[in-house]
Image: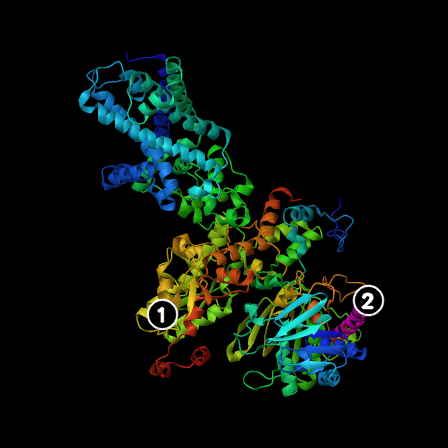
Amino acid sequence: MRYHPFTLPFSIGLGFIMLYIIVMWTIWIVRLSRREQKIVWKRLFSFRTISAIWESIREGLLHRNIFKRNVLLGYMHMSLAFGWFMLIVLGNLEARLYPHGVINPPYYPIFFEFFRHDLTPLHEYEEIFTFLMDFFLLMVISGVSLAFFKRFRSRTLGMKRTTRHILIDRIAITALWFIFPLRLFAESVTAGLYNTGHFFTNFIGQWVIYNLPLDYLYYPAWWAYSIALGVFFITMPFSRYMHIPAEILLIFLRKYGVKEKESHSTFTKIELSACSRCGICIDACQLSTSLNISDTQPAYFIRDLRYSQPNERLRETCMMCMRCLEACPVGIEITRIRENERREHPLFSASSYGYINGYKYPKAKVAYFAGCMGHLTPSVIKSTLALFDAANVDYTFIDKNGSICCGRPLQMNGQVEAAKQLIDKNNHLIGESGAEVLVTSCPICAREFATSYHLAIPVLHHSQFLLELTQQKRLNFNQSGLKVTYHDPCELSRGLHITSEPRELLQHAVILSNGSKETESKSLCCGGSLGITNISMAERNKIATDTLNEIVAESSSYLATACPMCRKTFANAQDKIKVLDIAEILEKNLNFAPEKVSEKNQSPIKQQAVIS
Amino acid sequence: MKKVAVIGGGVTGLEAASQLAQMGYTVTVFEKNSAAGGHVSKWDRLFPNRRHSIEVVNELKSYLNGNPAIYLSTAINKVTKKDNRFQLEAYNQVFEADAVLIATGFELFPAERKEEYGYGIYDNVITSAELEGMFKENGYPVKRNGDKPKRLAFIHCVGSRDEKVKRPYCSKVCCVTAVKQAIEVKEAIPEAEIFCLYMDLRMFGPGYEDLYKEAQQKGINFIRGRLSEASELEGSRVLIKTEDTLSSKPLKMSVDMVVLMVGMSPAQGTDELIAALGLQPNKDGFVEITDYHLNPVKTKVDGVFAAGACTGPNNITDSINAARSAAVEIHKYLNNK
Amino acid sequence: MIDFGFAPMEVSVHNMDTADLSLAHWINLHDETFNHCIACGSCAATCTAGQFTNFSFREVCHAIRRGEIKSAIDESEKCMLCGKCTLVCPRNVNTRNIIMLIRKANLTFRP
């Protein structure tokens, strides 16, 4: 017997989902831009494909990124994905080994335990296969149990909050959860009747449920299992589980170099579908951990964008700090998508800033740009310039008389057309100044200059420039022995990946001590973010104090940071610990070799530096 | 004889102590600094009539003739209450009292918290307290290099009415102090150009408005706008930026000296003291008073009273009034016990 | 109509009986810090845009409170959203949020 009507629900579901996936993949690939299609074809037969296959296994099946976050949570995802995958693969292999041939209907390996007891036993392999099938079923069941447990005690799995799901997801997840217990039940009943299982199903069939009327339960059990599978497959394209096929395609396309553009594209659609709403982004978000705003995170934003349109609150309630981006196990370009979504709602026109036309920056060799926020922290400017002087840098403070905003705040809020005006103007003026290098102490400006401007000169954050000077022995510092906690600004660490330079610099003058693992690419936001407008100052202060409580080591005398806005936000929020920029700390510990001092021409700033 | 402990030997503490001693109580004043007189002893002359502050302080100190007694350099670090008696501990010494008056006063706002004003960064940005010191020492202000400033700006509300530094309240006395100091600078350096950057001029006391008018007559300039940021120019001059809100135009000017009118902040250490007495600070960090109208020296705990600037920004007149009112309330309390 | 080359001028008085305060109410509904302003001018003084042109956040808000909606909305577009004002405001007025609200009002409130 190789057919039974109970296999129909499964077969219909499988047919539907396979067709759906093929159609969607085709539509997505066809709708990629010409350029994207070209690079995909060009790179299809390259090492990238192998790398993508490996990543699909690593992330799609083994879930390494989630393991890194929490072992139990990783195991839960891995056991479901990898366990199920192994059941399918092994089931297929097993079914093919029997003498009836290798061509089977698709449902046959899935329900093989149902059909197997009719077949002549295959002594060489049967033992090992029944053992493995039981083993992986046990693995999946353990994963389902953990998933069920997570509903009630998510903290044990490292999640403070989990995603609140919509109806279709609830149906799909219920079907999914039922699949494996029902499979276990059906196979155990079969094992109880025919002794076809191994340690797990035989044990349950012959010891646990042997009192039940197994004869009567036999068909209903297989029917139920098949229906659960069918329901899951039918709901899959409309639920979070579309992420399974979408993620595989995403991994491949990403490897070939396809990425988010300046506005939503077909690739965005694939990314949206690849979000499993696992909810890891919710805990990563400080709006949730500090302010209890737990309904605007990417899990929800991307869901609403996938189905229709996220509302204004959802779109705007985000600090753009990129912590979710860092935490996302699928690697969806969340921040970019949100920025692009904000772009769909322009509030400032392209003609907003005609008034800046007459402005000019002075001529410069090394141009120092303090930026808007920099002007609110005069001691940072003073210290930075004192260090430049000490190293005999021929610099010009180009925005001494006022800066034109770099455009980043507008851009973060989706006002691209307006930002472009400021960018063009600054771009032109900086070019006109004749500068050979642009140094800024503001990571917000630095990121904008580096990514949105087309400057022909290098753009350096002051930490990079000062480190260069130190390495050239143009700056010397005394080791003060003080302990200092360094806070990584979002735009510097996640935005520009500058995390080692400030640390290396600081270590010349102080001893670094961190009270938290939330550093470098995982660093916490100060709360001052320019990417959000709809939270109050009290809420910003709450984020700032929470961050300080988390990161500052008890032994630290100061908090060092490298962003004028972080510095100001932390300083405004509390008066327990003094917050200083790296330049201020370095200037305090500047060591002047005596002959060097006499070499310098004496400007007022230099004299002060000598005195201090 | 019943005993009263007065914590704080500023104008409030001294006045209350003398009144209570005259009523026949044994009074002990505990002052954490090495001299009595508090902040007032550091000022040169007082508004509104520019009387020398030393006169006021000396008169108050003259009452210290054994009863009231004063312990200088004595910070109370522990207080316990047992059966309506208080035990105050300082340096392992224990003092007993039937009633306690908190008169711990205030602390000046640390001006470096308003970093964008450049205090501690630029040479010629000083506080109003430092200006008083200069008056006391030289009779006129001096720049870091020893010269007399020719152009000065007084910045009102530094550490007052400012939620950014967690001081949302008005410190009351800075407006009139600024006007007083402006007049004094003008008298000492007649050619000096003086500007006051204010938001509202809160001239609430008798003679204050007259002082304001006198300043106007003497040519002091008033600009309605809060300082946003200062930067240093060549020669240690300071460039200040504000909005002239009356003409809705940004305004900038360079001056030789900037005087920051620092507000009153809760005194450090008062927190622990009042916590030991079972009291909480009010939302601004000062000692909480339970009846602002009919008994403005009463606290939540029986036998514990508070007067003067420890309850919120106060001028000398109000502090003296509060001290006397506290004396009466303590007398009533001790008699009804 | 005969064109005399001149017309009666709009009375230069704030007539609070007829002033259109709908935008002021709407903004306050979405951000109550709108009404917390004490007109100190810190925002305008520190303003990056204000260095180059006649732009004052304080004045824009004031105009809205006096019913001068159109000019306020037009003015608000000069803002660069740089955020300096938010960092200096002594009353913690959520300045950038209010600018965004005014810009949104441009789409709905414009008389």
Q: Secondary structure at mark 2?
A: helix
Q: Which mark is residue B305?
A: none
**Residue identifier under label 2:** B336
**Label 1 close to label 2 by CB (< 8 Å):** no
Report the Cα–Cα distance between label 1 and label 2.
Answer: 68 Å
Snapshot quadrant of residue A70: top left
Snapshot quadrant of residue A582: bottom left
Q: Observer-nearest residue: A346 or B58?
A: B58
Q: Position of residue B82 (x, y in %)?
A: 69, 66
Snapshot quadrant of residue A90: top left
Q: Position of residue B175 (x, y in %)?
A: 70, 72
Q: Main secondary structure of the magenta part?
A: helix
Callout 1: residue from which chain? A
Q: What stretch of residues is rendered in magenta? A: B319-337
Q: Quadrant of the C terminus of chain A?
A: bottom left
Q: What kind of residue is marked 1?
A: His
Q: Residues within 10 Å of mark 1 (few under 14, many from 20)?
A: some
**Residue identifier under label 1:** A508
Q: Is residue A223 left or right of residue A533?
A: left
